[in-house]
Amino acid sequence: MQKSILIIGACGQIGTELTMALREKYGNQSVIASDIREGSTVLMQSGPFELMDATDYNAIEDVVMHYEIEEVYLMAAMLSATGEKFPMRAWNLNMNSLFNVLNLAKEKKVDKIFWPSSIAVFGPNTPREHTPQQTLMDPTTVYGISKQSGERWCAYYHAKYGVDVRSVRYPGLISWKTLPGGGTTDYAVEIYHSALEEKRYTCFLEKSTKLPMMFMDDAIRATITIMDADPKTIKVRSSYNLNAMSFGPEEIADSIKAHIPEFEMTYQPDFRQQIADSWPSSIDDSQANADWGWVPEFDLDTTTKVMLENLNKA
Ligand code: SER
């Protein structure tokens, strides 16, 4: 089936792989990548690209009309750690970009939206283990507050205006193709690069800080699956809990040592420790499983194997 898709924030950690996966599925010319900066060679050369600011409604509208876009994936955002340094910039980018695409859908200029939420919507009083879909949410970061507000606006635009917006709460994402930037879970990517290059890593979180994590292939599959699902099956119009694995720095270090025995880990927690301490350590995603069949495939050991193999080749 042919359809015209716009990815906003296509050059980031998720956007890069999502764009390539959607180009593979729908054809290169059907998937328009856009970002405020240019991305990897493979992304730039494989299909259309537009330089675009996600906070500029008119710029997005122009691209949507020009390419007759049906679906928008809004991946542009400022993550938790950077958001604490630039609170107003994070709020401006994370909220205004969402309003721009919600309003385009309200005006029937696009049919369907994907917008990611995060485990950052939870806070210190949320049950930490097997965090339920519906629970107390008291986010303490600017990023988390923007994602929680965004979830309420998604549910509101769906209920009031019939906007078909779909969302998942991504855990920390681990990938080898593109580096993350500005997140609290970034250590779980940096560690693989450091292990291969220097055989050592200094972690900015304490050894026992267990957080929900996911390998990028699972995250891309979840994203495409929820977007392909029959709208009747999407019962949650805020955002779905999504689970794959949970581990702390000490466990990821052990999984790396199984391949690189001389690997050494030291710990120097910084301001990101407090952010991590406010988030769940594991997630109950039974509703995503019941509604649209979500089942993760990658655990920590398979993730480590694939990360080390691919980074070694790169
Ligand atoms: N990976 C994100 C962060 O650490 C959470 O969604 O900010």
Image: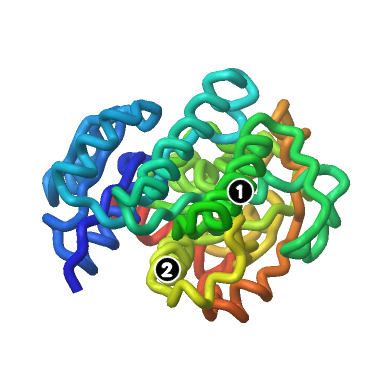
Q: Which residue is mark 1?
A: 151
Residue 11 occupies quadrant = top left
Residue placed under numbered mark 2 in the picture: 221
| Along the line of sight, the residue nearer the viewer: 46 or 88 | 88
Quadrant location of the N terminus in the rendered image: bottom left
Q: Is residue 48 left or right of residue 260?
A: left
Task: Please provide percent x and percent y for residue 79.
Answer: 55, 35
**Residue 230 pos. (x, y %):** 43, 77
Q: What's the residue at 33%, 42% (across, down)?
A: 8
Of residue 148 and residue 215, the one placed in the foreground of this image is: 148
Position of residue 44 in the picture relative to residue 206 (left or right): left
Q: Give the vertical position of 265 relative to 229 (above or below).
A: above
Characterize the local packing of mark 1: few (<14), some (14-19) or many (20 or more) Cα atoms within 10 angstroms.
Answer: many
Between residue 61 and residue 172, name the one nearer to us.
61
Marks 2/1 in contact by CB < 8 Å: the verdict is no
Asked if one can make out residue 258 in the rendered structure from this viewpoint, the answer is yes
* Image side of residue 108 versus residue 275, left or right: left
Name the side, left or right, on which 108 lies relative to 156.
Answer: left
Instruction: Indicate the amino acid at tag 2.
Output: Arg
Density class for disc 2 (Cα within 10 Å; few <14, some 14-19, many ≥20) is some
Image coordinates for residue 294, horizontal then vertical, percent:
54, 75
Disc 1 residue type (three-letter): Glu
Label annotation for residue 48 = none
Q: Secondary structure at mark 1?
A: helix
> Residue 271: which quarter of the image?
top right
| Residue drawn at x 21%, y 63% as measured from the top left | 3
* Residue lying at 41% horizontally and 48% vertically, measured from the top left: 106
C-alpha distance separating marks 2 and 1: 21 Å
Report x, y in % for residue 112. 38, 58
Instruction: Please state which of the two labelled residues, at mark 2 or mark 1, is closer to the viewer.
Output: 1
- Secondary structure beneath label 2: helix
